[in-house]
Image (cartoon, grey):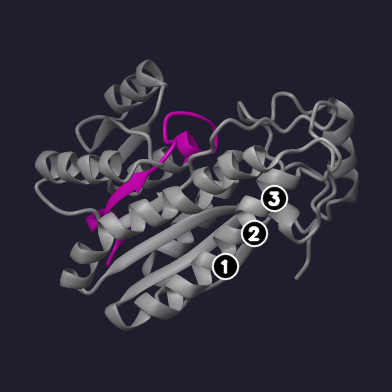
Amino acid sequence: MDIKRQTVLVTGGSRGLGEAVVRAFAREGANVVINYYQSKERAENLAEELGEQTVALQGDVRSKEAVEKIFKEAVSYFKMPITTIVNNALVGFSFDPVERKNAEDISWEDFSVQFEGSVQAALNTAQAGIPDMKAQEFGRIVNIGTNLVQNPVVPYHDYTSGKAALLGLTRTMARDLGPYGITVNMASGGLLKETDASKATSAEVFQIIQQNTPLQRVITPEEMADAVLLFASPLSRAVTGQNLIVDGGLVMK
């Protein structure tokens, strides 16, 4: 299915990488649901700017009931089901290498927050979308990961563990849903310059990444968004269960 015929849900779509993904899909002519949790004004302003092909819908994606409501409201607005899900929402995390919790201090509650924001949220959106995807024999699920799983240059224990678990879910769902024409993939970025979550990152860290990356620069949210588009496009129709690392070559795998 061409991107312009798809209806796309982008969780955490009002800012940072989510906003870039929303703009990328809108640019290609898709219908886009801008999901937000607290950033009401930003989400609604973005929807107003992009026009009738987008709609801003509030909901905490950690809640199964809230996600089901989002899907119903999307169908009511666009008169067609969601075909494509981008699980991008990031719950309560900042990439701050100075204030991060180390191995001695981090608690299981910290891990739980990130597991809920990564795995539980992705499970909720997938389960809400699977029935319609099966019915139309087409679906695209793209989970946002991190290259820290492969190379934890900064040991963000809770965040990285949550994304590692999400990679496992990506692969098991790809195996389970493939027979129905549904692909499930992950796009894993490095530190992006810049998002709300990376504002706390020091200039020194950005410089180290730039110096050690083959492209000699830090990747932008817009470049990451284009990789997400690839997984939704017909060009990757035979690709599922994969983790594409989008970091300028810092991690090679």
Element under disc 1: helix
Q: Residue 157: horizontal and vertical position, in percent?
A: 75, 46
232 versus 134 height, above or below: above
Q: Is residue 8 left or right of residue 195?
A: left
Magenta residue span: 1-20
Q: Is residue 193 left or right of residue 132?
A: right
Image quarter of the N terminus:
bottom left
Image quarter of the C terminus:
bottom right
Residue for badge 2? 164
Residue for badge 1? 168
On residue 160, which mark appears?
A: 3
125 versus 175 height, above or below: above
Q: Is residue 116 visible?
A: yes
Give the class, few, some or many, for how many residues have Cα within 10 Å of label 1's Cα (few <14, many ≥20).
Answer: few
Q: Quadrant of residue 107?
A: top right
Toward the top, the furthest residue is 41
Q: Quadrant of residue 138?
A: bottom left
